[in-house]
């Protein structure tokens, strides 16, 4: 689901992407999917909040693909908290939520916190490619 206001990245721009996913299997699947898309540079994956903040600060991606459930290095902090922090610090960064926690309460909360897209890993995994192409337009 796309929010109403998406500021596109210039056509031909290489999208620099960071994933934040605690499952190495899912992270590898996303990375493999990204490798098939033109003008994509995969910058790395973080498995928890602390490493995500550090990776994002260091690599300055255009896009973050973020899970709601993350490794619990910071008690009581999850991907939605990270989404809020990223949106506050990097207002122009595109954020794609990709999660198994896809109930309406998660979707609505993530969109209200500033996610540009929200996808269910089980049903919408391939829609991430469409979202990235929309961002590239």
Image (tube, grey):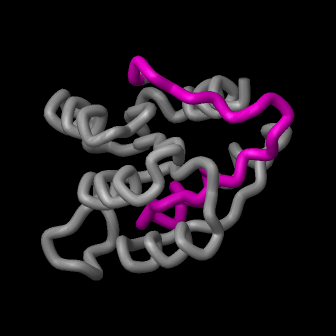
Q: Residue at x 38, y 78 (%)?
A: 50
Query: Can you say whether 59 is above or below 112 in the image?
Result: below
Query: Can you say whether 16 is above or below 11 in the image?
Result: below
Is 111 a magenta residue?
A: no
Query: Can you say whether 7 is above or below 18 in the image?
Result: above
Taking depth in this image into account, of 33 and 49 the one nearest to the observer is: 49
Q: Residue at x 20, y 67 (%)?
A: 77
Q: Residue at x 52, y 34 (%)?
A: 125
Q: Residue at x 44, y 72 (%)?
A: 53
Residue 98 sits in quarter? top left
Please state the horizontal and vertical placement of residue 97, each as a whole percent of the image: 41, 42
Residue 55 lies left or right of residue 14; in this view the side is: left
Please state the horizontal and vertical placement of residue 40, each as a whole percent of the image: 77, 47
Residue 19 lies left or right of residue 36; in this view the side is: left
Is 28 a magenta residue?
A: yes
Please state the horizontal and vertical placement of residue 57, each as a whole percent of the image: 54, 72
Taking depth in this image into account, of 60 and 52 the one nearest to the observer is: 60
Q: Which residues are magenta?
A: 3-30
């Amino acid at each position: 689901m796309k929010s109403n206001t998406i500021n596109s990245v210039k056509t031909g721009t290489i999208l620099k992407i960071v994933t934040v996913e605690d499952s190495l299997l899912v992270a590898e699947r996303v990375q493999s999917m990204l490798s098939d898309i033109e003008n994509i540079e995969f910058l790395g994956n973080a498995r928890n909040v602390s490493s995500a903040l550090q990776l994002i600060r260091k690599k300055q991606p255009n896009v973050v693909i973020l899970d709601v459930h993350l490794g619990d290095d910071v008690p009581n902090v999850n991907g939605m908290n990270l989404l809020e922090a990223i949106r506050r610090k990097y207002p122009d960064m595109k954020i794609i939520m990709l999660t198994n926690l896809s109930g309406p309460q998660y979707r609505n909360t993530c969109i209200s916190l500033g996610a540009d897209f929200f996808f269910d890993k089980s049903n919408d995994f391939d829609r991430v490619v469409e979202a990235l192409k929309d961002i590239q337009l």
